[in-house]
Amino acid sequence: MKSASVLRTTWYKLLFVAVLLLVLLAVLVVFFPWDLLREPINRRVSAQIGRHFEITRRLDVKLGRITTVFADGITVANPPWARAPFLLKADSAEIDVRLWPLLTGKVVIARISVKSPQVGLEANEQGQRSWVLSRDASDTGSAPEIGEVVVDTGTLSYLAPAQGADIELLFSLAPESGSSMPLVYSAKGRWQTEPFSASGRTGGVLRLSRDLNSRFPIEVEARVGTTRLKAKGSVTDLARLSALEASFDLQGQNLEALYRIAGVALPATPPYKLRGEVKKQDALWTLSQIEGILGNSDMSGNLTFDQSGSVATLSGKLQSNVLDFNDLAPMIGLPDAPAGRKPVSLPGRRKEETAKAVQQRTSEASPASPASARKVLPNAPLDLPRLNAMNADVSYSAARIRHAPALPLDRGSARVRLQDGQLDLSPISLGVAGGTIAGTISVNSRVKPPTLAARLDIRGAQLNRLFPTVETSKSSLGRISGQLDLNGRGNSAAEMLGSASGDLSALMGRGEISNLLLELIGLDGAEIIKFLVGGDRNVQIRCAVVAFDVKQGLMTSRAIVLDTVDTVIQGSGQINLATETLDLRLDPSPKDLSILSLRSPMRVGGSFAAPRVGPEKAALAGRGALALALGLVNPLLALAATVETGQGKDADCAASFTQGKPGQARKGSMPPGSETRSVR
């Protein structure tokens, strides 16, 4: 019994000693002068991250499963190559570190709270980033895993020459309390070398962990150059921006500017204003409920932008209720239309608000030049880097096209596909003069110079709507079909057409045409007087054919025939797409007897911008001279020179149609008088 009592007493003593040691250890931990470790820690961390680290005033630690380190005054230097001396400088910081991962050498920081921080972030052109805490500051370095960052008032600078970025940001707590976004900020500087400014509000706690249930609210109003963005939403996984949801309003002078700002290759446009919803999940951006205006055209639809591949891909569907043709000018390389046109109203917006959305053109008009010297074909150079910057598959449709006075367009649609520098508009369909033009257009930028292949078919175009600016054609009847097949090379649409080879043709069967127009072509004075007194009437068209062979931009007539019940017009000549000049001759042959006729061949010359139409001067002068000579003998004889005996015969419409078909050109198969000649 005595031995058992002694053993029990011994165990009690040992237990007492153990408890005493634990108490002493706890007291030691609680009252341990942690500040003595400040200098060793400064040296250890500095050696670990390869740059100067210092707790400048006092260090304290509260041990636990999550250990809290309090640093009174803290600085983390930037690498020597950085402009800003400090990555972080703050009055104080509280850092909550998870204890168990430290045993495996992994630093997991659950929370950082800093007072009055000054942050300097910089990325150089060699790929080094100052915020990566490793010796080489590259992306291969290991950085601590950080959960939350809490700040109050401070500054942040960001410098990245490769992005043309140099930004200074100020942030502080909002004066009011209880807001879900207590942190206000403002920034200014440059982004992609363009002037940059931004302001807004965010949540006060920056959650950097991959907690998909935690959303960080953000509100921003930013401006880069002439592009302005307003957005409000939330970000999940703030460190990686892997998930985002927001509504946005975007406006600017030209969507093309987004290529420099965000790497999205879009065509040139007039001033625009768009709004919608944006979501991001990992590398996939989704823009939905898009609606807005581009110039005077409305726009709506949905788009996705996938950055997961080696080349980003844009896809989706867009549509317009009304497309203003003038708004296509910058997109296809034509001169801008005059500003100041009344804009299309956005649904749900006041007219005056929408009007302000369309800003005036800021570029000055080019000096006036003679119309004959002005070029019509689009000559804007292709931007080859952009054609190779991303892929695309976007469908677009316009229910109505307006303000195309010289082109009778009424609707259109196209599927735009861009794959590794190959641009295809296939299929493309345009409503033209009550008919359709459909086919494919391809541009291959993978070769130098780029190549063009265009094949378009026209079906059922109405003659009276085909030339909307010609008053005398409005009463004409008939439907036209045709085909265009061209291949060319060049760095612009003008160069491609100027070097193109292929053929084009247009055919029409029976119809009607203004007799006044017909007699004006033939300069039949008696018929013109009759129509002016008694009114115009239509005459029957038996057939009409226009066909050209195209070689290196020179269009040479294969067949030009217009056969009516009282006149046959046959033509010949050339159209030069490289110089944009015309040289055509039209020979009218009447089938009826007429007096006061000065019929002579008609010439169509000049340039595309300023065409000239008139009688062939030599033939007209010869007939006038004959009338004058006979008039000197006997005034009544002068009329003899103006008498048309009507030698014209019906054209062989079947043969003309055969000549008009592609690939039917044969030597000697041209209509009489259709020999070719050089463009003057």
Image (spheres, rainbow, N blue to C red):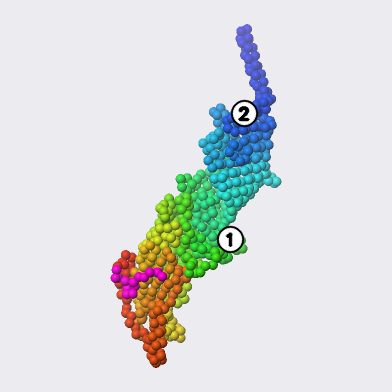
The image quadrant that residue 150 belongs to is top right
**Dot 2: element:** helix
Are the residues flagged by discs 2 and 1 in contact, CB closer than 8 Å? no
Q: Nearer the viewer, residue 106 or 497?
A: 497
Q: Nearer the viewer, residue 126 or 99?
A: 126
Residue, far top = 2
Which residue is rendered at x = 43% and y = 52% of the image?
421
Q: Which of marks 2 and 1 is nearer the N terminus?
A: 2
Q: Which mark is residue 540?
A: none
Q: How far apart are marks 2 and 1 (CA)?
A: 59 Å
x%, y% of residue 318? Answer: 49, 57
**Dot 1: element:** loop
Which residue is rendered at x = 61% and y = 38% of the image?
87
Q: Which mark is residue 43?
A: 2
Q: Is residue 675 magenta?
A: yes
Left or right side of 383 for 3: right
Which residue is rendered at x = 44% and y = 85% of the image?
529
Quadrant (top left/top right/bottom left/bottom right) for the N terminus: top right
- The residue carrying mark 1 is 362
Quadrant (top left/top right/bottom left/bottom right) for the C terminus: bottom left
Which residue is rendered at x = 45% and y = 69% of the image?
607
x%, y% of residue 305? Answer: 49, 50
Residue range in magenta is 667-680
Q: Can residue 216 be seen here?
A: no
